[in-house]
Amino acid sequence: MPLKNIVEIIIDFLQRKDPDELFAEPINPDVVEHYYEIVKQPMDFGTMRAKIFEGMYTNIELFKV
């Protein structure tokens, strides 16, 4: 199975664990004060899906980071 498909399956699984879609898109710093001071490497499902589409995950290590 291609890495792209594996990563999509993982993201689908994780998104089902986020029914309120808190991590569907980047966090708005105006809504969640100090978020970017606390979370140094933020990531959201929308950004991850864009990276899949753009072919940025060329190995599993890049996805894990």
Image (tube, rainbow, N blue to C red):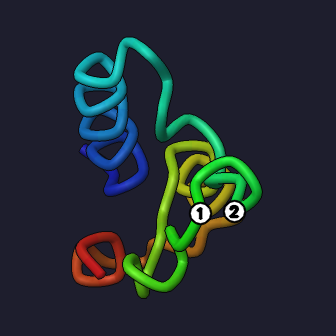
| Amino acid type shown at disc 2 | Pro
Residue occupied by mark 1: 33
Indicate left or right for 59 with 20 as reference: left
Q: Quadrant of the C terminus?
A: bottom left
Task: Residue 29: give its label.
Answer: 2
Q: Quadrant of the N terminus?
A: top left
Nearer to us of marks 1 and 2 is 1
Indicate left or right for 55 with 18 as reference: right
Find the distance from the CA under tag 1 to the CA under tag 2. Answer: 6 Å
Q: Position of residue 33 (x, y in %)?
A: 59, 63
Marks 2 and 1: in contact by CB < 8 Å? Answer: yes
For numbered disc 2, what is the local secondary structure? Answer: loop
| Amino acid type shown at disc 1 | Glu
Q: Position of residue 40 (x, y in %)?
A: 42, 87
Residue furthest out toward the front: 33
At a point 56% along the width and 35% down the height, the residue shown is 24
Front-lying residue, 61 or 26:
26
Q: Position of residue 49 (x, y in %)?
A: 58, 47
Front-lying residue, 17 or 61:
17
Q: Position of residue 56 (x, y in %)?
A: 57, 75
For numbered disc 1, what is the local secondary structure? Answer: loop
